[in-house]
Amino acid sequence: MQTRRDGNSATVVARREDTEVSFGGLCACVTLHDLGVSVTMNPDEGKWRDVEWARRKALDVILTPETVVDVLAVICKINRDLGKEEGKKELRQQISCLLGVR
């Protein structure tokens, strides 16, 4: 993905097992591997090399009133497709992760 004004791609600036942070001149991208979600944001000033800070910023975007309903609808559909019992278990786990409760 082209993300810098000078033509270079965004580079990975921080990585952890569950999170990867890329930062460039035109966007910042936080991939939450444990949730299977990638959030692309404006490259505002911040602590992009701090994985916890970047992860919290991405979760704040996901949990805004404008997007949380859509996110929950997708999660519910995926979990319904897994089956009733397995779906309930997975749904509880994913909602807990979204809310920051592990």
Image (cartoon, helix red, strand yellow):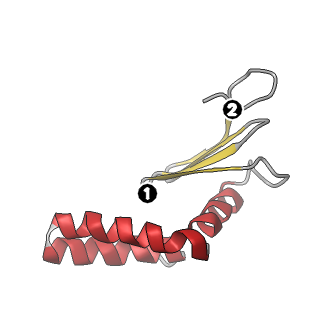
Query: Residue 69 in the image: x percent, y percent?
Result: 47, 74
Mark 2: secondary structure: loop
- Look at discs 2 and 1 and give the one toward the viewer: 2
Labels 2 and 1 touching (C-beta < 8 A): no
Residue named by callout 1 = 34
Indicate the amino acid at tag 1: Asp
Secondary structure at numbered mark 1? loop
Q: Which residue is depicted at the point 32% across and 74% down? A: 91
- List x then y, in percent, for residue 54: 68, 57
Given residues 19 and 60, the one toward you in this image is 60
Q: Is residue 81 above or below residue 39?
A: below
One can see residue 63 in this view: no
What residue lies at 31% left-to-right and 71% top-to-bottom? 76
- Tell me how far mark 2 sits from mark 1, CA to CA: 22 Å
The one of 52 and 71 positioned closer to us in this rendering: 71
Give how far across and how far down residue 77 sits, in percent.
28, 67
Quadrant location, the N terminus: top right
Residue 54 visible within the image: yes
Identity of the residue drawn at 81% across and 22% down:
6
Left or right? Give the position of 66 relative to 43: left
Instruction: Kindly identify which numbered label has been placed on residue 10.
Output: 2
Query: In the image as oriented, which residue stretches furthest toward the right?
Result: 45
- Relative to residue 34, is residue 97 depicted above or below? below
- Dot 1 alpha-carbon crowd within 10 angstroms: few under 14, some 14 to 19, many 20 or more: few
Any mark on residue 47, and which? none
